[in-house]
Amino acid sequence: MSTITKAIIATAGWGIRRLPITKSIEKAMLPVGNRPLVDYVVQDCIKAGIRDIYLVVNQGNSQVRSYYSDNSELSAYLSGGRQDEILRSLALPNVNFHFIEQPRNSRYGTAIPVSLVAPELKPGESVVMMTGDDFIYNRDGSSEVARLIEATPEGGNSMLAADVGPKLIGRYGAIQFDQNNNFVQIVEKPAEGQAPSTWANISKYVLNYDMVQSITNYSQLDMSGEYYITEPINQYVYGGGSIKVVGAAGQYLDGGNVYSWLAANNAVLNMPSYTSSEPQSPPTDSNQQ
């Protein structure tokens, strides 16, 4: 049984692709069904045995923090009578939520949330890293995070991949992996017919302590532009390290643009208008092009 009990969930960012709605609603709080996007990630982590969740939020933002905090006035209003069932459904799980603010006008990118939480980790400890605006949906209620952890070598590193198909892979970073499903490289937004596979990097990882330190060191470099978590990952592999690529068993759903968000709602609510294909199998040798 894995001893990984901590997860980082990145929810900071302006949500530029979802403006104007994200002017007043944090992107991770956009609803899919009757729950916010981020809660699908949180619940998946909880099912996997995560007990400390570090939510990295924009400086000054309060919506994610409010959602995972007690609302005593609402609880008092719902208590008693027929409202008890509703009240029980709102009960917070037995998990410790930690809120880490990411400064608005400083360094940004997928590496930054890891560096902000790094001081909370002990030597030898591994952590799950997730983004809060997309998730893997399993209709049977199983945990994709649990599968990712189980597939990760003890004390090692891994990344979750989603098969988005040949038509969509050009929008993502296409993962190249070897015959043992070990990461080789990521080809960002490949031209048609140039992708090494149809498996996309969706920024969901298990990271060991040494990798977290490498990401933190990279985040402290004086450079312009975005700090991508894939940069220190590439350096780690070039230096002889190994990262396992784990194919998602469930369906990848994304709230990044209005069309994919609508598709996510249709999928979760099982609406008849949703026509996407069934989830693909995890990567094997035959999945590589």
Image: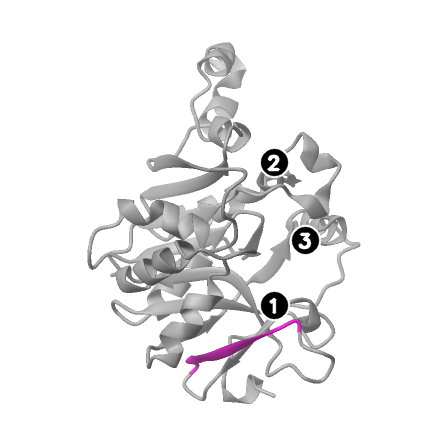
From mark 3 to mark 2, how far is it between C-alphas? Answer: 22 Å
The residue located at (69%, 45%) in the rendering is 16
- Please tell me whether mark 3 sits on a helix, a strand or a loop: helix
The residue located at (67%, 74%) in the rendering is 165
Numbered badge on residue 247: none
Q: Position of residue 283 (x, y in %)?
A: 51, 79
> Going by the image, does 34 lie left or right of 8?
right
The residue located at (54%, 56%) in the rendering is 224
Please, is residue 269 above or below residue 286 in the view? above
Residue beneath disc 3: 267
Residue beneath disc 2: 26
Q: Earlier along the polypeptide chain: callout 1 or callout 3?
A: 3
From mark 1 to mark 3, how far is it between C-alphas? Answer: 12 Å
Q: Position of residue 131 (x, y in %)?
A: 51, 51
Q: Is residue 185 magenta?
A: yes
Q: Mark 2–mark 1 contact, CB under 8 Å?
A: no
Please, is residue 79 above or below residue 113 in the view? above
The amino acid marked with disc number 2 is Glu
Of marks 2 and 1, the one in the foreground: 2
Of marks 3 and 2, the one in the foreground: 2
- Please tell me whether mark 1 sits on a helix, a strand or a loop: loop
Q: Position of residue 215 (x, y in %)?
A: 38, 60
What span is in magenta?
A: 181-189
Residue beneath disc 1: 279
**Circle 3 residues within 10 Å: few <14, some 14–19, many ≥20:** many
